Image (cartoon, helix red, strand yellow):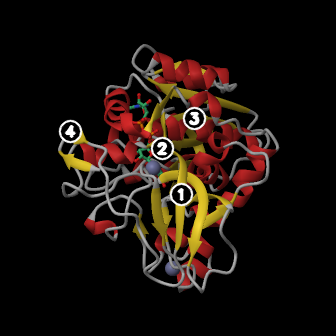
């Protein structure tokens, strides 16, 4: 649980119970720490001491309410990081992240006050919509990120409209960018370029088949021009969520190319050169929060088929009891991804 800015702790709390008949109680078998959890850890988003935290998890259904149709006791499931109703106008169109009743697990009072998945048990509302069955034989760690960052990368690449001759540049190859790289490959990119100032993250992207470009040492535009006959990338996926990265993305894209913004923005502002965008005929697409429910089956199938490998992103495996240490490792960037098991 959140204890205060810069502090989390593991404490005994009451087990969650069914509150609405669409709920399921999931016994968490594996969870992970996500970059978004750090926003609370740093006090950038409001959370009170004692609030549960975490939204990436897999587990086993322990109990379901009377209205749950698709799951029962003993089913292994992935939990969606965004909790939606499944039945409003937006949800019915597959735009679940725009749900009228949008909530997040373990994200404080403004996100619905739901418990976190960095726990032994969690209550999942509208379980039929917000859980996905895990195929027999698939390990927890392979399924874990399908509820959040893996499907986000897959979705970002899917809506970026990648063609078979396209060079795709991913700006920022942290955990989300790592999956954007693999998503771009699954969606048919001819070549994927990875841009990041961080050596280790670039090395990981290179291991997955991307061409590394070290931002800072290399001038991004010049480096991308060198491998694209001077044109720039056909498609750019921005997976940082910082105005500097957004600007890089719009600079390295070719005339008539597309930028898909997966990185998250809250209150940041940027000056936009409309005339340059217009004359270069840029297509800029904001991904928004990933509507995981519309994409996670496809993403899980890609994992099952071996087209996406989530395991190399995991750098640390700790017991849930050591969560505080996990946050330290992740916050200091010593860890690329921390997995916690109760
Ligand atoms: N759309 C969604 O649903 C969704 C879901 C999850 C996360 N996100 C967002 O995606 C973004 C990335 O998440 P993450 O967990 O991988 O974050 P992260 O901070 O771990 O990784 C960001 C990476 O970008 C690199 N970077 C920083 N500045 C850069 C620059 N100017 N140019 C190139 N690279 C730069 C960093 O070195 C790092 O490797 C965040 O904004 C996060 O909030 C969005
Ligand atoms: Zn997350
Ligand atoms: Zn809805």
Name the residue tied to disc 3: 178
Residue at the spot x=62%, y=28% of the render? 312
Numbered disc in front, either 4 or 1: 1
Separation (CA) of disc 2 from disc 3: 26 Å
- Sequence order check, earlier mark of 4 and 3: 4
Q: Are marks 2 and 3 in contact (CB under 8 Å)?
A: no
- Sequence order check, earlier mark of 2 and 4: 4
Name the residue tied to disc 1: 27
Q: Are marks 2 and 4 in contact (CB under 8 Å)?
A: no
Q: What element carries label 1?
A: strand
Q: Residues within 10 Å of mark 3 (few under 14, many from 20)?
A: many
- Sequence order check, earlier mark of 2 and 1: 1
Does mark 1 have its CB less than 8 Å from ligand 2?
Answer: no
**Residue 88: x %, y % from top left:** 53, 85
Separation (CA) of disc 4 from disc 3: 26 Å
Q: Which mark is residue 6?
A: 4
- Sequence order check, earlier mark of 4 and 1: 4
Q: Residue 342 carries which label?
A: 2
Q: Are marks 4 and 1 in contact (CB under 8 Å)?
A: no
Does mark 3 have its CB less than 8 Å from ligand 1?
Answer: yes
Q: In this view, does 83 lie above or below 162?
A: below
The quadrant where residue 68 appears: bottom right
Separation (CA) of disc 4 from disc 1: 27 Å
Numbered disc in front, either 1 or 3: 1
**Residue 78: x %, y % from top left:** 61, 56
Q: What element carries label 2?
A: loop
């Amino acid at each position: 649980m959140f204890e205060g800015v810069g502090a989390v702790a593991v404490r005994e709390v009451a087990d969650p119970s069914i509150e609405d008949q669409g709920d399921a109680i999931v016994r968490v078998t594996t969870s992970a720490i996500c970059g978004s959890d750090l926003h609370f850890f740093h006090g950038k988003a409001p959370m009170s001491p004692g609030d549960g935290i975490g939204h990436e998890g897999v587990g086993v259904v322990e109990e379901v309410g009377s209205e749950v149709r698709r799951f029962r006791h003993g089913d292994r499931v992935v939990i969606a990081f965004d909790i939606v109703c499944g039945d409003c106008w937006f949800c019915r169109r597959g735009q679940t992240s725009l749900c009228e009743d949008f909530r997040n697990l373990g994200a404080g009072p403004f996100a619905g006050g739901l418990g976190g998945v960095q726990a032994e048990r969690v209550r999942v509302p509208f379980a039929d919509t917000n859980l996905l069955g895990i195929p027999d034989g698939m390990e927890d760690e392979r399924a874990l990120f399908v509820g959040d960052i893996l499907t986000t990368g897959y979705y970002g690449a899917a809506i970026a409209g990648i063609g078979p001759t396209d060079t795709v540049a991913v700006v920022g190859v942290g955990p989300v960018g790592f999956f954007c790289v693999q998503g771009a490959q699954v969606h048919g990119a001819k070549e994927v370029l990875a841009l990041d100032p961080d050596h280790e993250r670039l090395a990981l992207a290179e291991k997955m088949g991307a061409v590394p470009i070290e931002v800072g040492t290399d001038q991004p535009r010049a480096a991308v021009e060198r491998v694209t006959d001077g044109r720039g990338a056909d498609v750019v996926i921005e997976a940082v969520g910082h105005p500097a990265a957004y600007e890089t993305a719009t600079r390295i894209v070719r005339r008539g190319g597309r930028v898909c913004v997966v990185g998250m923005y809250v209150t940041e502002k940027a000056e936009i050169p409309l005339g340059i965008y217009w004359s270069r005929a840029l297509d800029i697409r904001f991904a928004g929060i990933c509507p995981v429910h519309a994409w996670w089956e496809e993403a899980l199938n890609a994992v099952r088929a071996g087209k996406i490998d989530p395991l190399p992103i995991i750098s640390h495996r700790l017991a849930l009891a050591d969560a505080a240490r996990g946050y330290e490792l992740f916050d200091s960037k010593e860890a690329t991804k921390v997995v916690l098991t109760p």
